[in-house]
Amino acid sequence: MEDVKSRGPFIYSVLESAQAFLAQHPFQEPEETLADGKEVSPSRRILNVSRSVWKQANVASDLWEKLTARCVDRHRHMERTLERLLQIQAAMEELAVALEQAEGVRDAWEPVGDLFIDSLQDHIDATKLFKEELTQVKEGMKHINDLAHQLAIADVHLSMENAHALEHLNSRWKVLQGSIEERLKQLQDAHRDFGPGSQHFLSSSVQIPWERAISPNKVPYYINHQAQTTCWDHPKMTELYQALADLNNIKFSAYRTAMKLRRVQKALRLDLVALSGLVEVFRDQELQQGEHVMDVVEVIHGLTALYERLEEERSIVVNIPLCVDMCLNWLLNVYDSARNGKVRVLSFKMGLVSLCNADVQEKYKYLFRQVSGPGGLTDQRHLSLLLHEAIQIPRQLGEVAAFGGSNVEPSVRSCFRVAPGKPSIEVSHFLEWMSLEPQSMVWLPVLHRVTAAESTKHQAKCYVCKQCPIKGFRYRSLKQFNVDICQTCFLTGRTTKGKKLHYPIMEYYTPTTSGEKMRDFAKTLKNKFRSKQYFTKHPQRGYLPVQSVLEAESSETPCSSPKLPHADTHSRIEHFASSLYITHPSSSLQPLTLLADDTLRKMMQHGVCQCVFVCTGDAGEAF
């Protein structure tokens, strides 16, 4: 460029000389072609020279203008290129410093294995924040690579030193990105496997040779390395189910089911959990929508919070991993026997509320609220959902046939008869119906009576086994004086001298008072003058029977739960008995019945006694 500028004065002087010559010797005549041999005059020769000078001056002027314009463009291009090179160099220096600082942070990371479990989430958040802070570095790397690409397109190449420096920066950036992603993955995996939301802490719920494993849908299963077998049930749950077989000699399904559930309740330690504590856990876990579906991890979160709260409130030592795993196992057996890894919120609440420590009326009210609308009313569909969830509990024990089967529609219709003609019912209607102990739900109040009777002692001697005092339930004859039977003899059907009970029996689960003794004496005296045929012709049940019909199962009924070894036999016997009773209601296969006049009903409502039974012939298997 400078060389061109230096030649400018000479070019301009030559062009000025040409202009001066043309000014002295102008030409206006067109160029003429002379004949051969004809001499050119001096004036003509001057005109020809002027014309030649004019042409060459124009050509030189055009070439000079083009040359200077090209030089200016090239100069500007070189300035832009230099500017980009300076930008690249400055950016590379800045990025080198930023990368060095970021690499310092990376090198200061503690190994994931050395971190505390409780701090994993904090480290995850810190790593994500660190990744976001490197956004400027990411944009800077993109910028210098774009500049280098633009220079390459313009056929301008970086020096070897700068090219190596840029390549080194790109390499360091890729390594840093990979380190961040790997760190984040390790932290998230550790948090999933060992963090508060993981199931790692539940591994201690089993002992050698057992191992707790997790399926892809987060459902736990158990491996016995000694026997080389796997199963869905926790080893302790298997032992519990095997122990429940001891109760199969109880003749009456409601009591058999209630006593089995009582053992389950104690094994899960739900007998220590108050309903108010459950409600707090449900609220903290945001379990408000009954039809919302929970996965296994959410169920574990809720159960963990529940047992941690129990340990804190009761100031007792709770084996939280074992309790959580056992309760999860039971809930899955009842509500997710196919092990899909999903449980509805309503199912979760029904299972826990049914077995918690609370007044039965409070349970009824709370459960009704779970399916009622803003106005406190519920329709048949929502009541059907509630009863469907409830019936799954005895169903899992193989006892469902005695409670009307899995189809809850007859129970729904029975409940709505309390409020005839209304499309919806309120809680008072539901409580009135439940006070009659409907067949599909009778196991729940019986469970409460079983619980209340456990610590009760009656100052009386068993007429059959001579036990004194009688512990638990006490059954007093209202046909014969001074005949009391303990719960073991009565529930298992043991009698003396091969005799069978054909008379009314009063059940007590609290100590009797003098007033109750007088009432029983009056009843016994009255019944002395009544024959066996009278009681056969005037049976009154201790529960509200549901007129079952052979209807199709509800489409929302889940797959059958895993049954106990004895459950198939019970289920089949009860199914055939139920079917036979439906087909031939006048046959001798009748449920155990009871007398319940106004006086006794008042006594029942005050929790003094339950009912007066009348056994008819050999019947008495259902309740």
Image (tube, helix red, strand yellow):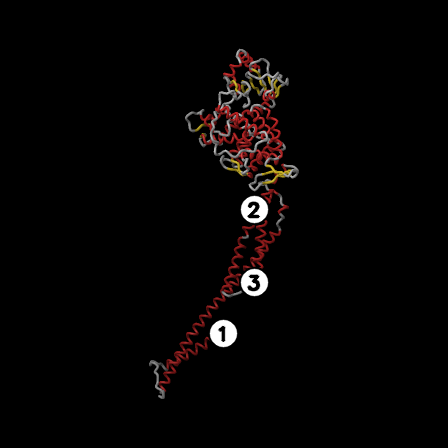
- Kindly identify the amino acid type of the residue bearing the numbered disc 2: Asp
Residue 467 percent coordinates (x, y): 64, 18
- Kindly identify the amino acid type of the residue bearing the numbered disc 3: Ala
Q: Which residue in the protein does label 2 denote? A: 125
Q: Quadrant of residue 475?
A: top right
Q: Nearer the viewer, residue 186 or 503?
A: 503
| Mark 3, secondary structure of its residue | helix
| Mark 1, secondary structure of its residue | helix
Q: Is residue 416 above or below residue 524?
A: below
Determine the CA span between mark 2 and mark 3.
Answer: 36 Å
| Quadrant where the C terminus is found in the figure | top right
Q: Nearer the viewer, mark 2 or mark 3?
A: 3
Q: Nearer the viewer, mark 1 or mark 3?
A: 3
Q: Which mark is residue 163?
A: 3
Q: Nearer the viewer, mark 2 or mark 1?
A: 2
Q: Which residue in the protein does label 1 denote? A: 3
- Kindly identify the amino acid type of the residue bearing the numbered disc 1: Asp
Determine the CA span between mark 2 and mark 1.
Answer: 63 Å
